[in-house]
Image: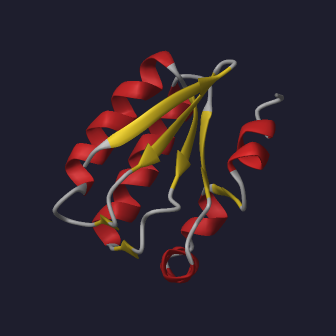
Amino acid sequence: MNTNLETIGDVAVIELLGESLDAMSSDDVKDELCGLAVEHPKLVVDLHRITFLDSSGCGALVTAQKRCREAGGDLHVCNVTGPVRTVMEIARLSRMLGVYPTRAEAVATFGH
């Protein structure tokens, strides 16, 4: 999946440019997020384009969050669409990840 990376202070914001975070894309996304966690452990994932999320996508986000935390940071998500929010709530992922309505709010949680 293609991504767009922006750095705001010491926070990396990665925008996922596909429509689905599923079995077809989750390994690539997980690898990219986990790789970013090494240099940018404070990570925000912008999901505004994602309209479908399955269990493998959830797993990719959880694995990346674990890597961020191991590196001294955390992973938050923002701009979650309605269908994705529903899946996150059912999977209780919204309790594990910081879920914010906007990119600015997610970045601000890191002290910026």
> From what the image shows, is residue 49 above or below residue 40?
below
Identify which residue is drawn at 55% across, 73% down: 81
- Give left or right: position of 78 versus 111: left
Left/right of residue 97 with respect to residue 55 in the rendered view: right
Q: Quadrant of residue 31?
A: top left
Q: Quadrant of residue 10?
A: top right
Image quadrant occupied by the C terminus: top right
Q: Residue at x 52, y 47 (%)?
A: 45
Give how far across and how far down residue 16 sits, in percent. 40, 50
Q: Residue furthest left?
A: 24
Count up the numbered dots.
Answer: 0
Q: Residue at x 52, y 32 (%)?
A: 68
On screen, residue 112 above or below 63? above
The location of residue 39, given as percent across then percent down, is: 47, 16
Could you tell me which residue is drawn at 83 percent across and 29 percent down?
A: 111
Give the colouring mode of the picture: secondary structure
Q: Nearer the viewer, residue 48 or 109?
A: 48
- In-front residue for pair 107/59: 107
* 4 shown above or below 50: above
Q: Please state the horizontal and vertical placement of residue 61, each as a whole percent of the image.
A: 43, 52
Where, by quadrant of the figure, is residue 26 drawn? bottom left
- In the image, taking residue 44 as reference, residue 106 lies left or right, namely right
